[in-house]
Amino acid sequence: AKRVYLFNEGNKDDRELLGGKGANLCEMTSLGLPVPFGFIITTATCREYFQAGNKLPGLLEQEYRVALDLVEKKMDARFGDPEDPLLFSVRSGAPVSMPGMMNTILNLGLNDEIAEGLARKTNNPRFAYDCYRRFISMFADVVMGVPGEKFEHEIEKYKAANNKKTDVEMDAEDWQAIIEIYKTLVDFPEDPFEQLKMAVEAVFQSWHTPRAIIYREMNNIPDTLGTAVNVQAMVFGNFGEDSGSGVAFTRNPSTGEHHFFGEFLFNAAGEDVVAGIRTPLPVEALRERQPEVYDELFSTQALLEKHYRDMQDLEFTVQEGRFYMLQTRSGKRTGRAAVKIAVDMVGEGLIDEREALMRVSPEHVEAFLHPTVDPDAKQDIIASGLPASPGGATGEIVFSAEEAEQVSAQGRSVILVRRETTPEDIHGMKVAAGILTELGGMTSHAAVVARGMGVCAITGCGSLNINYAEGTAHTDDGVQLKRGDIITLDGASGEVMLGDIPKTEASSSDDFQTLLSWADKHRRLKVRANAETPEDAAKARELGAEGIGLCRTEHMFFEARRIEQMRAMILAESQEERQKYLDALLEFQRADMLELFKVMDGLPVTIRLLDPPLHEFLPHEEADMQALAEAIGKPLEKVREITEGLAEVNPMLGFRGCRLSIVYPEITEMQVQAIMSAAADAVEQGYRPLPEIMIPLVVNVREIRLISEIIDRGVQAVLRERLVSVPYKVGTMMETPRATLGADRLAPEVEFMSFGTNDLTQMTYGFSRDDAGKFIPRYIEKKLVDADPFVSLDQRAVGRLMEMAVNESRRVKKGIKYGICGEHGGDPRSIRFCHNLGLDYVSCSPFRVPIARIAAAQANV
Ligand code: PEP
Ligand code: MG
C-alpha cells in the first residue's frame, strides 16, 4: 500500500491513516492556507515497523525520496545541498491527540558544511548557527539518547564564563563555540538522508516511551494505533526580530469566551513557546508590531473555526514578516469552556444540540462539580500567576513528581510545585490536587495537561523562586516556603495562598443547565440516585435525579447512636430482646423514610431491605466491645462470644442480604412497618410517596416468594390501620449469577429488577470486593483486563449475564422495570451499555447524576 502522502493528498478525515496532525495539515493545505509543504508517512507503516520487529519496510526510503523531491520543487530549495539548503521538521502524529507525548526533531538536514551554506544564503550566521546547535542537541537527545540536560548544562557554563545572561545575547560566534563543545558530546551522522531515516525510526519508537504509554492508559487510547511521521519544510521563527512563533486558541480555552486568545514570542522557535522557557506575550503584541501579519492570523483562525465547527488550537510561525500555519487541532479546554463553547456554537448555528452534547465529556462536567476557593475567605495571598486550570485545591508542597506520588500514596493531598512541567511529570500531576509552576504561559505543558485532567493549576508564577536541591521556595516578597507546607491554589484567579482556605461547593451555570436540559430531551434512560440521607437525596434531586434507585437502609444506621442499637439488635439472644432494639430502630427508620419521601415527592424511592455485611457493624476492638457490653448490659464475655460466633471467613459471601430476612423475619417486618408508616405519614401530610421495596442478594424464586409474603402482610397491616392507599412495588436486586441465570423464574414474582453490579461483578469474577484492590492494579498494568471491572462494567461476562436476564425475564412477563444500581450506574461507558440493553434507568451517586444524564443522552444521539 501507499506509505507516503504529500500534504496535498489527504484531508481531515484521514486521521486513522495520517494521524491527526497530518490530516489537518492536508486539510489546511487544501484550504489554501500558507502551510510549509511536506509529506506524511502513514500510521500503517508504523504498525508494519513494529510487526517486523522494529524494521523499516524495505521500499519506504525509495517512496519518501520521491515525495521529498516534490517537496524540494515546491519549496525551491534542496535537502542536503549546502548552496540552497532545505531543512525539515520531523514530528509524530497519532490518530488521537497526545500532546507532547512523542518525539519531534527540528532543523533536520544540517551538518558543518550545510550550516555554513545556510549562514551564507540567509546572510544571517547567528540564525544559522542557532539552528545548528538546536538541531544537534535535539537529535542527540531524541534520536541518540544523549540526555538533553547535558547540552543545556554546557550552555549555562558557557554563559556564566562569558558573562551572558540570555539566549538573545548569544551571537553567531557564541553558538559556533557551543557547537564545537556539542560535537565532543555526540557523534551524530553528517549525512542528511541518514539523519532523516534515523529520525523517522525515532518517531516510531517514541510510541512506546513510558510517558506515551501512561498517557494512553489514562485516556483509554488503544496501544495498537501507532503514529504517523510528519516531515515538513522548516520555517523559522528564530530568524530575527521580524520573526517569531505563537500558539493561539480561537476561543478562550479556560472560560470559553468567544474571544481570540493567543501568545507569541518574537525571535523564537515554536519549541520555545510550548516549553514555557520564556514567558510569552499576548498575541496582541503582534498586532502592534506587525499588523498585516496579525490580520492574516486573525482571519485564518476565524476561517479554521468555521471550517472545523469547533474551537481550534493553532501553532503558527512568522518568518521575516511572512505568516505560516504549522498546526491546527481541536483545542483542549476546561469543563466550563467546553460547555460554554458547545452552547454558544448552537446559538451561532455552527452545530446542533446533539452535536453539542457529544462535545462534552464526563471530565468536563465534573468541573461544574469541583470546589472553588471561597472569595470571601481569601487571605495570605503570597503570589499569583496565570489561572491555567480552574478549581480550588489545598495540599502539602512537593517539588517532584516522585514525591507527589509518595505523599499522595499516604493519603495526603499534594500541590506539585515545579519551575515548569514536562511529560516526565505526568505521573505526579495525575495524583496532585493542584499544580503550580514558576514559568510557562497558558499554553505551556503544565497548563494544557492540567486542564485536560481537570486538575487545578497555576502557571507562570514568576515571583516564586524554587530551589529544588534544598526543597524550598521563596517569593519575591520574602515569604519562605518549604516541602510539606500547606498552600491553597485558586485555579480560577491564579492566586496562591498560605494554609487551607475554605472552598465552596461547585456552582452551576446557565450554559450548563441549558446543556443538561438538552441531555434530558435527547435521552431515553432515566437517571436515579443512590442515596439514603435526606441531604444526599435533596442534592440528587437538585442535580436532576428522577428518584432514588437504591436506598441502602443499613447505611441509615452508620451514625454513632444508631450503630449501637444496630449492634445490640445483631447481638440479641432472643426474639423478645431483638424486638426491643428493632422497636428503637423502627423509629429512626421511619423518621428518615418520611424525609426521603418528602424530598422525593412524586418520584420513586427504591428502598432495599437490610443488607449489612455483618462485619461492618460489629465491634472488633476490645475497648469497643467493652463499651457495647456496658451499654446493652451484657457481660463482656458474652459480647465477645457472640461476636466471635458471628465471625465469617468471607463476609462478602456470608450472612447478608435476604438471608437475614429469612433467619430473622422480624427485621423485615420492622422495616416494612417503618417504610409504610412513613409513607402513610407522607400521604397525610400531602405528599405523594412511591415506595419500591427491594429484596437484596436473591438467589432463587422461593426466597422472593417467602419475603414478598412478609412484605405484603406488613404493608396491608399498616394501610389497613392507617386507612390510606399507597402505591407500592416489590422487586429484586439482580446481583448473584444464579439470579441472573434464573431470571425467567423470578420474573412472575417481581415488578422490577435492579442489577447490583458490584456484587454481580464480585461473584462473576470470584474477586472479592474487599480484596480486589490488592491485585487489580497489576491486572491493569499487565493488560490482563482493559479496565477495573468494578469501575467500568465488564460487558463480556457480567454484561452477558445482564443481557440474558433481561431477555429471558421479558419473555415471561412484560412491564418489568429494569435498572442498575451498582457503581457502574455512574460510569459513562457502562451507561451506554445499559442504554443499548434497554434498561429503564441507571442509579448512581448524587454527584454523578449530571454526568449520567449527559452520558445517557450521548448513548442515544
Ligand atoms: C451492588 O451489589 O451492586 C449493590 C448496589 O449493592 P451493594 O454495593 O450495597 O452491595
Ligand atoms: Mg450488593
Image (spheres, rainbow, N blue to C red):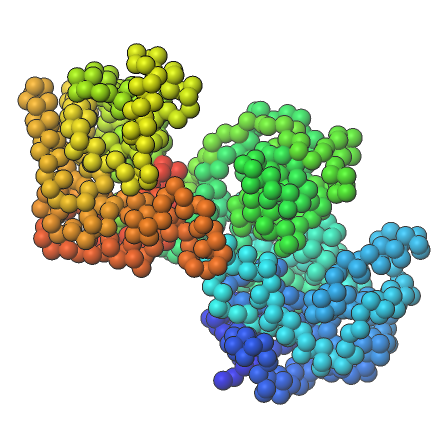
Q: Is residue 357 visible?
A: no
Q: Is residue 433 above or below residue 167?
A: above
Image quarter where the C terminus lies is: bottom left
Q: Which residue lies at the image location 57% right of the left edge and 83% below the top edge?
A: 57
748 sits to left or right of 35: left
The residue lying at 87 percent from left, 59 percent from top is: 170
Residue 419, given in percent of the width and then of the height, sits at: 71, 46
Above or below for 354 versus 318: above
| Nearer to us in this view, 131 or 147 | 147
Question: Is residue 397 shown above or below 216?
Answer: above
The count of marks equals: 0
| Residue drawn at 52 percent across, 84 percent down | 2
257 or 421, which is in the foreground? 421
530 displayed left or right of 277: left
Choose top left, top right, bottom left or bottom right for residue 584. Answer: top left
Percent position (x, y) of residue 206? Answer: 61, 66
Residue 435 locus on image (x, y percent): 62, 42
Q: Which residue: 74% across, 61% down?
A: 147
Q: Position of residue 16 (x, y in %)?
A: 48, 71
- Which picture quadrant has residue 39? bottom right
- The reply to whether residue 416 is visible in this rendering is yes
Residues 18 and 51: in front is: 51
Q: Nearer the viewer, residue 615 or 281?
A: 615
For residue 56, side relative to residue 575 (left or right): right
